Amino acid sequence: MLYLAQVKKNIISGDIELELLARQKSEHIWKVSESKFIPLNQEKSLNEGLLVLAELDDNAQIIKIKEAKKWILSLVTEYLSNNSITPEFVQKEQERVEKWRQEIALTSQDLTRRSLEIETHREQLQELEENLMREKEKLASKIKEVQQEEEDDLN
């Protein structure tokens, strides 16, 4: 796991340690962690106060350490410089998302209304078709009756 850490000197023992400040959860997601100290035995050359990126194994043993300067500067460039993400930009994006959400809700309501209208029209057409079939059967029955009466009258 990757951690942002600061090099510290233990005031009691005088040993150099890493204070783990934040842990990477995914590529762009970090979680601030409660202070935890890891002994730093192999790297005596690191100055106290230096921010580093420390890769630890599952047993909290240090695998690799590198200075965090380039990483921090890339964050500043990407997220905090003049033309990047600002609170105003975030606010505008939230407003835009809310507008889209409202438009989608209205479109969904309109589609639901249209669907109900189509279903109502379909039921009405089906009812008309059934009525026409009954009328057709009645007319066919009347025609047979009239034809039968005519035959009877001729005989």
Image (tube, rainbow, N blue to C red):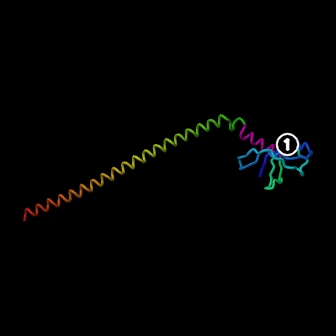
- Left or right of residue 86, residue 36 in this image: right
- Left or right of residue 15, residue 116 in this image: left
Q: Main secondary structure of the magenta part?
A: helix
Q: Residues within 10 Å of mark 1 (few under 14, many from 20)?
A: some
Would you identify the image quadrant in which residue 69 lies?
Answer: top right
Would you identify the image quadrant in which residue 91 lies?
Answer: top right
Q: Name the spot of residue 73 as percent of width and height, x first.
A: 77, 41
Determine the residue positioned at 81% across, 49% down: 54
- Left or right of residue 100, residue 118 in this image: left
Determine the residue positioned at 79% across, 56% down: 58
Question: Looking at the image, is 144 positioned above or below residue 115?
Answer: below
Determine the residue positioned at 36% across, 48% down: 121
Determine the residue positioned at 71% across, 46% down: 29
Magenta highlight on residue 20 = no
Q: State which region is magenta.
A: 67-80
Under mark 1, the amino acid is Leu
Q: Name the spot of residue 100 as percent of width and height, x first.
A: 55, 41
- Left or right of residue 116, residue 21 in this image: right
- Decide which of 29, 16 is in the foreground and name it: 16
Q: Name the spot of residue 122 as percent of width and height, x first.
A: 36, 51
Q: Name the spot of residue 68 as percent of width and height, x first.
A: 81, 45
Give SS at disc 1: loop
Magenta highlight on residue 73 = yes
Q: Which residue is mark 1?
A: 50
Quarter of the figure with the C terminus: bottom left
